[in-house]
Amino acid sequence: MVNIYKSIQSLDEKNATLKYWKTLKLKETELLLLACAGLFVEASAANYIAIAGQELAITAQIVCRNKVEVMMNKVSYLNQLDTIVSSSLKQNELYTFKRKEKLANVISYSNPYWLNQKASNGRYQVSSISLIGKPENDAQAKVQFDITIAGLNLKIDKSIIYKSTDPVKGEVYRPLEILPPATVNFTEKVIVFSDSPSKMIQLVIKANTTNVTGILKLNAPSGWTVKMKNAEFKLVAKDEEVIIDIEIVAGEKAEHAVLSASLLIDGKTYSKSIKRIEYDHIPYQIILSDAETKLINVDLKKTGVEIGYIPGAGDDVAACLKQVGYNVTILTDELLVNENLSKYNAIVTGVRAYNTNDRLQIHYSKLMEYIKNGGNLVVQYNTNNRIGPVVAKIAPYPFTISRDRVTDEFAKVTFTNKEHSVLNSPNKINDNDFDAWIQERGIYFATELDKEYQTVFDMNDPSEKPSNGSVIVAKYGKGNFVYTGLSFFRELPAGVPGAYRLFVNLLSIPQNK
């Protein structure tokens, strides 16, 4: 294996292609060499968070499990200092080296490189074309092991990680996080104003190290006013948090605006918020983004404000409705059994509610009675396939949930039933209300409609036939049934004004005489 490595190493790099393959094969051969030698090397930190300019306790370990001649020459920490070893490794003996070293004063934060700049039109922006295709960032904090195997000198770079022991999972690894001294998060990513000129919101400041003292600064857009009682904060312990309340007074004309936050700490400004992603089936991840929230001032007219919400697979629509002044009650199974539903002006089912909640078929008759007596039932999209078929009956009249969708968020929307109340009451809907939609228009549209259903829109992706099943409405007794595949579950949390106006109209379809 050593001879193979040396043969590849001696190849002449005549062009970029050969250089690429030479580098790749040298790395693969190095991994084979380490595996054949039974050589295990690792570098870990005493904590999973590191701050630029601060000390980091590092443990470097190496063990050789096979009878191979391995010379340990030196260990380099953070590309700064070396520990000279010059020792032959004994079989199955663990060698441990501990050092405390300072991180560089200027170092990039841990964040997926493709998220360091804001995306535009569904495309990520990166600082260098050489980064494209990398599944992860290159390690910034690492330890280099300088060894010699059978006369071949190798320099092995190991990213510094953090490991702990869980009583159930055993040894758990997570990446080292290089963070600012503190982060600041708005509790809401979008603040929608409709029925009130001012709102109270909160920001959470969290310390990533000890003894963090600073001042919160807010940058409000022109025409908007921000008030807070005390901008100063002091966090003694690492992971300590403080919540700061602020009042925002909406600008008169602005429909889209951004409020940003920053922290002034020891004369330096930090302006990052943090989101942690932790699931057993994927590696632990964090996202650092600009600390900001969108401010949306929507001209929104409402009728009744009492809404019942039946949760589905999970969405933020109920919270969005609360933001614009609705009184939203989450309808649990117990409430659906015992509650008098006539108190609600409309009832909404969350996305894929009929796929995930087997009990909804039990409540079918009660929901139909609710509609017949004058209520509006708005059903958001469900899937209908072999994996997640709809078992329960949904509507008073038959229709089929298809796999039709419109994935182009800029796709033209044609109004095919211009006199319908969905387009006129209480908010007048026009083409502009489909501006600034994100990710898609909608999914799982309705097809094979009973004659009792009315449609409102036609839309399609390029080179595909138009679909009219994005919104279907049927009168039933005094009330109305609505099925919609439009992606309100994406648009409302994103603060799309037109989506709010249209959704409110679905909730407000007048009773039938």
Image: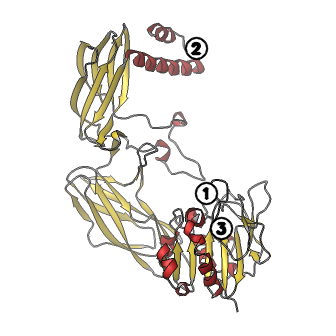
Q: Specify which label sits upstream in the sequence, 1 or 2.
A: 2
Q: In terms of depth relative to the viewer, which is nearer, 477 or 504?
A: 477
Per the rendering, the mark at residue 439 is 1
How far is the residue under mark 2 from the one under mark 3?
55 Å
Q: Hey, what amino acid is under mark 1? A: Gln
Q: Position of residue 330 (x, y in %)?
A: 48, 74
The residue wearing badge 2 is 14
Mark 1 nearby-residue class (10 Å; few <14, some 14–19, many ≥20): some
Badge 2 element = loop
Q: Hey, what amino acid is under mark 3? A: Phe
Q: Hey, what amino acid is under mark 2? A: Lys
Q: Could one spot residue 351 in this view of the protein?
A: no
Q: Position of residue 337 (x, y in %)?
A: 51, 79
The residue wearing badge 3 is 434
| Vertical placement of residue 49 versus 10, above or below | below
Q: Quadrant of the C terminus?
A: bottom right
Residue in view at x 43 percent, y 34 percent: 138
Residue in view at x 59 percent, y 63 percent: 352
Which residue ends up furthest to the front in the rendered image?
362
* Figure quadrant of residue 110: top left
Q: How many marks?
A: 3
Q: Could one spot residue 163 in this view of the protein?
A: yes
Mark 3 nearby-residue class (10 Å; few <14, some 14–19, many ≥20): many
Q: Nearer the viewer, mark 2 or mark 3?
A: 3
In the displayed structure, does residue 116 sit left or right of residue 388?
Answer: left
Q: Position of residue 287 (x, y in %)?
A: 42, 49
